[in-house]
Amino acid sequence: MAGPKPIDIQLIGEEVAIKWSDEREDYIPMERLRAWSPSAENVGEPDIFGRIHGADPRDAFPGVRVDGFEFVGTYAVRFIFSDRHQSGLYSYEYLRRLGEYAAENAT
């Protein structure tokens, strides 16, 4: 059985607001969303020995905003960030986990 899907995404202030098909709403700070990008550019790629290459060592992206987004098939969202990063595909399942984490760690 497939999990909930985003039915509405809006860019509100410094957050990405996501309304899910099960009526849950998540608010994820844009800077954190950029830091959590699952792209190879961000997290690196393992070689045949398991060593990670190409990871961005930063864990914060101050001032980076989401300029837009697009749905990828029926399983992910690609966000377009103000620093031109746009290669991360955020699966719906991953976005749900990020939403939960953001809610638990809101300041």
Image (cartoon, grey):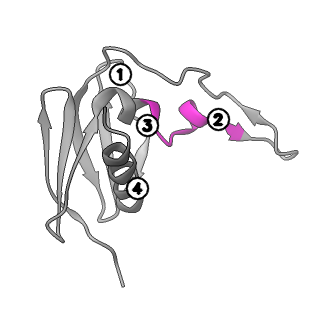
- Give the foreground label among 1 and 4: 4
Instruction: Report the Cα–Cα distance between label 3 and label 1.
Output: 9 Å
Instruction: Report the Cα–Cα distance between label 2 and label 4.
Output: 21 Å
Where's the C terminus, which quadrant? top left
Would residue 56 appear left or right of 76 to someone viewing this image?
right
Q: Nearer the viewer, residue 83 or 17?
A: 17
Would residue 53 appear left or right of 13 to someone viewing this image?
right
Crowding at dot 2, Cα within 10 Å, few <14 / some 14-19 / many 20+, comes out as some
Instruction: Report the Cα–Cα distance between label 4 and label 3.
Output: 19 Å
Residue 84 numbered tag: 1
- Give the foreground label among 4 and 3: 4
Disc on the earlier residue, 1 or 4:
1
Q: Amino acid at mark 3?
A: Ser
| Callout 3: SS | loop
| Callout 4: SS | helix
Which quarter of the figure has residue 81? top left
Instruction: Report the Cα–Cα distance between label 1 and label 4.
Output: 24 Å
Q: Which residue was labeled with disc 3?
A: 87
Q: Amino acid at mark 4?
A: Arg
Q: Which residue was labeled with disc 2?
A: 44
